[in-house]
Amino acid sequence: MANEGSTINPFETAKRQVDIVADLLGLDDGMRQILKHPKRELTVNFPVRMDNGSYRVFTGHRVQYNNARGPSKGGIRYHPQVTLDEVRALAAWMTWKCSVVNLPYGGAKGGVVCDPKTMSKHELERLTRRYASEIAPIIGPEMDIPAPDVYTDSQTMAWIMDTYSSMKGYTVPGVVTGKPIGLGGSEGRGEATGRGCAYVIREAAPHAGVKVRGGSVAVQGFGNAGSVAAKLLHDEQGAKIVAVSDTKGGIYNADGFNPHAVEEHKMKTGSVVGFPGTKSITNEELLEIHTDVLIPAALENQITKKVAEKIQAKIVAEAANGPTLPEADTVLYERKVTVLPDVLANAGGVTVSYFEWAQDIQGFFWPLDEVNHKLEAIMVRSYNDVHKVSEARHVHNRTAAYVLAVQRVVDAITIRGIYP
Ligand code: NAD
């Protein structure tokens, strides 16, 4: 991830974003201070018994950024480079994302400084259970609901649910989302991010002068979010997938290819590269090819100002979190490229997490078509909300989404009032 964006402190960026929106909304200094401070932060240092019998102390964080609109919600990340400021920024962004799609949630995030690639499954289980027990006093279905993030998955969520439930003395499925289906997970959660992204592209296309049927699509990062978006755009909307990539590089064919066949090729060979009938391209070249829709679905900080000047796509739909740097946003806006920002374009994941939580609380589970139908309604409504603000205020979609999200949080804080 070594690029020009990697040295930026993400929490400074998150606070700058609040200031920009606060200026637009004319917020006073007191409200700005509230919006730029996490409400609650917990740092825990805890011992884990390693497989060789030794003990190691790990550090973890849980930050609840804002809960004015409801319990806080956000994933847990396991990574050697986790810092408190990164967790604060991610928690702030979760607050805005939940608000953009109007879920009754605030925002939170967690992280443990560790290198999961060098740990055994047993070590990861002990680390997860101990971290869960340390943060247990501040999580719960009515307080703060974690979910998977980088290097955590449905198994991690199952361990957290079991640890929390053991401490309570009864089973509490609603304490985390992203669980396996057999433990109270939701149908459709696995593909929700890509599906939500495909719905938002469909809604934006007419405003951006794009015909998705027969139109071309390039996807950087053929993983969970990117491959699902590609398959759904291909199968349900008749789009031509012309380029996809992964860490090993990209493939291109102007006439399009079948993303299901590419997925099979990737499963057999470990990469999309070498798929028959395509030409190899680099990840940088992928961002600059002539295409109707470009979906960054890999990492943050991919679209710099320089890259933005060369992008040929009419729509950039951010399945990834934070792929575009702020200077690049301005360039894309001036070049009339429609950006569908991450807080909108990848919010399908947290939306179906919300459905999972609601189903767990009711103890009543919905079939897949009901989940997808409800997801579609929320993504369509949210796109239209953002588009209206963008038109009315003459700002790009990211600013519009932030204006909408921050205003909703401000309204909740104002109506609730300050205690005492
Ligand atoms: P994933 O690990 O399933 O897929 C990531 C893909 O990106 C992999 O194919 C990987 O090979 C590729 N990749 C990694 N580095 C790359 C590089 N330098 N160039 C090109 N490709 C590269 O992860 P995911 O869950 O699909 O997440 C992808 C992005 O979407 C992340 O930014 C994540 O935060 C965001 N996101 C995911 C979800 C979700 O529900 N999965 C929800 C919201 C946001």
Image (spheres, rainbow, N blue to C red):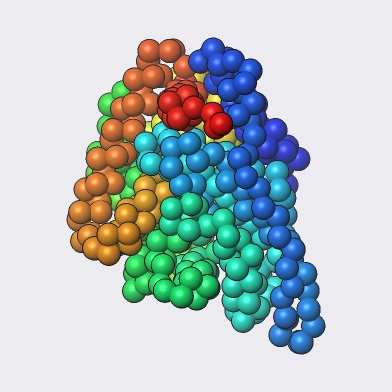
Q: In this view, does 121 lie above or below 369?
A: below
Residue 98 image point, x, y percent:
43, 40
Q: In this view, does 96 lie above or below 132?
A: above
Instruction: Give me the residue at 33% from left, 62% from top.
Output: 360
Residue 353 falls in image quadrant: bottom left
Q: How many labels does the image show?
A: 0
Q: In this view, does 103 lie above or below 13?
A: below
Residue 326 visible in rendering: no
Residue 404 image point, x, y percent:
43, 25
Residue 152 visible in rendering: yes
In the displayed structure, does residue 168 sit left or right of residue 283?
left
Residue 362 falls in image quadrant: bottom left
Instruction: Give me the residue at 76% from left, 40% from top.
Output: 7
Instruction: Give me the residue at 55% from left, 16% from top.
Output: 27
Residue that sits furthest to the front in the current view: 420
Instruction: Give me the residue at 41% from left, 67% from top.
Output: 172
| Quarter that holds the C terminus | top right
**Residue placed most toward the observer, 92 or 397:** 92
**Residue placed most toward the observer, 382 or 270:** 382
In the displayed structure, does residue 161 sit left or right of residue 109?
left
Residue 116 image point, x, y percent:
65, 69
**Residue placed most toward the observer, 326 or 230:** 326
